[in-house]
Image (spheres, helix red, strand yellow):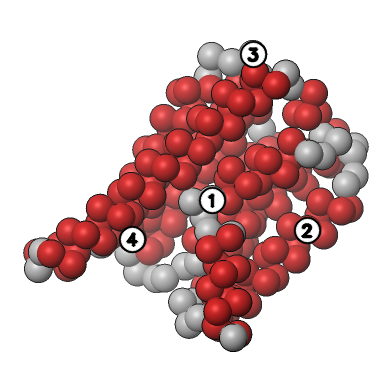
Amino acid sequence: MEKFLARSISIVFHPLLLPTLGLLLLFQTDLYITFLSGTLKQVIFISTLISTGVIPALFVLSGRIFKSNSESWEKVPVQTLTYLISGVSYFAGYYLVSKLPVAGFFNAIFLSGTLVLVALALISLRWNISSHMAALGALFGIVLAIMLRLGQHDMGLIIIILLASGFTGYARLVMGKNNPAQVYAGYILGFSILFLIFNFV
């Protein structure tokens, strides 16, 4: 039962889903991006879903198929390639929203996400850092930086993100996918990059 719950949590807060879920969560808050028009929100939502979810997911599935059918694919660092392909896809998302009137904020999200993915790709060559926790750390970094910059406080949102982070970190440990150091390192990596970029750039 515990492993079933852990797996369910890992799926819900999967790095491929989290940017879209995080965006939907931000749209429901009192932060300034909630004042975007419905059309703009739809365009941003679809761009985010495609560039951070659909395209990377297709590569992951393709990699698993090739890995099961080709011995030579066994030697390919699929996880590292997945991060790099996802980074390219994030950059494509940046391009898609760059013409929008609110492009600055969302460009920063996509470019910051690209930076996180490049860092994950490099680290994953030597160490199995947690991408789940990096994604949640990045989400917390964005939200906290926005609140500090705007002088707005939404404790409910902070609590939700911290609870999701705690449950997901526990789930990764229960499933044996990461050790505590990899969980903490992933969270710190994602948080640091997004918080610093959004708070000081």
Name the spot of residue 105 as percent of width and height, x first: 65, 28
Q: Residue at x 45, y 36 (%)?
A: 50
| Mark positioned earlier in the residue sequence (1 or 4) | 1
Amino acid tagged 2: Ile
Amino acid tagged 1: Leu
Q: Which label sits on residue 101?
A: 3
Q: Nearer the viewer, mark 1 or mark 3?
A: 1
Q: Looking at the picture, does residue 79 appear above or below residue 30?
A: below
Amino acid tagged 3: Pro
In depth, the one of 185 and 175 nearer the eye is 175
Q: Which label sits on residue 17?
A: 1
Q: Is label 1 in contact with label 3 (beta carbons under 8 Å)?
A: no
Relative horizontal placement of residue 72, taking residue 89 as reference (left or right): left
Q: Which label sits on residue 79?
A: 4
User: How many numbered marks does the figure carry?
Assistant: 4
* Secondary structure found at label 3: loop
| Mark positioned earlier in the residue sequence (1 or 2) | 1
Q: Which residue extends farthest bottom? A: 1
Crowding around mark 3 (Cα neighbors within 10 Å: few <14, some 14 to 19, many 20+) is few
Q: Is label 2 in contact with label 4 (beta carbons under 8 Å)?
A: no
Q: Is label 3 in contact with label 2 (beta carbons under 8 Å)?
A: no
Q: Which label sits on residue 160?
A: 2
| Mark positioned earlier in the residue sequence (2 or 4) | 4
Amino acid tagged 4: Gln
Residue 160: image quadrant is bottom right
Whether residue 139 is visible here, answered yes or no, is: yes
Q: Looking at the picture, does residue 23 appear above or below residue 155?
A: above
